Every structure is written in C-alpha cells, then in structure tokens.
Amino acid sequence: MDEKTLSVLLGHYSVSFTLDTYAHVLDDHKWEGMQLMDELYFIDQSAPGQQVYPLLVTPENGGYTFTAPDFPLVSIWAGTVEDGLLQIRAALKDTLLTQVYPPVATPLNEVTAQPGQFSLQIAL
C-alpha cells in the first residue's frame, strides 16, 4: 500500500506524519547507503595500472573550468560537468603519453579548493 493511502486510512493530516510515525531506517539500509556514497566519492587507488588524480572544477561563464593540480598546463572549459570530464580525461591521457615520468598523484585531501570550487577524482 502506498503512503498516501495509508495516511488517509489512518486519518492522519499528512503523509509526512505517517512516515515520521511508522517509517524507520534499518541499520542494514544505512550501511548500504554509506557504502554507495563511499563508492561514489572515493575511487579505489589500488587498481593496477591506474593512477587517480584530483581535479578542481570552477563554475563560471555558464559552464565549468577543469584544472588538474598535478598537470598545471592542462585546463579545460566545458558547458557541462559530463563534457568537461570527458575532455579533461582525454587531455590528461594525451599529456601522460608525452611524459617519461608521470607525476605522482596528489592525495585529494591535500588539494585546496577556493570558494565556489569543488573537487573530483579521475582515474587514468
């Protein structure tokens, strides 16, 4: 039975009251949610053959500027985050092909974002 129908049958004044009263989050569901968030925000840095580099993303001019602190000469502007990620990944892969010794990736927690910026990680 959906929440609205249950709320009406119980005579509650709102669905939120019904949910606040009868809905509970199980510890297993909390754990699953935390695992999902962990997977979304932290890339496995131990994957063989992959290096994980931090990115700084600055919203500006109706789009986003992507920079990689470990690659100071690479900067990409894109209209969407998705396009920016595709473009900077390609640019960083091209840059890595020309380098004898790729830079050591800076840990994400050592990257300082300026106000308005946000950080991401990219596996190459």
Image: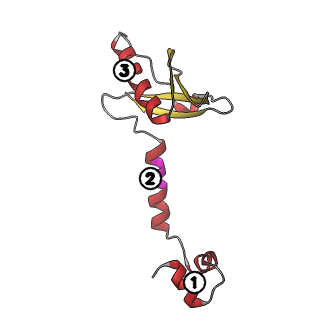
- In the image, 42 versus 117, the foreground residue is 117
What's drawn in magenta, residue-wise? 34-38
Residue 35 counted in the magenta span: yes
Q: Could you say where residue 45 lies in the image, as x and y percent from the top left?
A: 40, 34
Q: Is residue 65 magenta?
A: no
Mark 3 or 1, which is nearer the eye? 1
Q: Position of residue 112 (x, y in %)?
A: 62, 28
Image quarter where the C terminus lies is top left
Residue count near mark 1 (Cα–Cα under 10 Å), binned few <14, some 14–19, many ≥20:
some
Mark 3 belongs to which amino acid?
Lys
Q: Earlier in the sequence, mark 2 or mark 1?
A: 1
Residue visible at 30% across and 28% down? 49
Residue 33 lies, in percent from the top left, at 47, 58
Q: Is residue 77 above or below residue 27?
A: above
Total numbered circles:
3
Q: Amino acid at mark 1?
A: Ser
Q: Colour scheme used in the picture?
A: secondary structure
State the CA–CA distance, disc 2 to disc 1.
31 Å
The residue depicted at 34 percent of the width and 29 percent of the height is 50
Q: How would you classify the magenta stretch by its main secondary structure?
A: helix
Answer whether labels 2 and 3 touch (C-beta < 8 Å): no
Residue hosting label 3: 93
Mark carried by residue 36: 2
| Kind of residue at disc 2 | Leu
Q: Is residue 107 above or below residue 5?
A: above
Dot label at residue 29:
none
Label 2 and label 3: CA atoms lie apart by: 28 Å
**Residue identifier under label 1:** 7
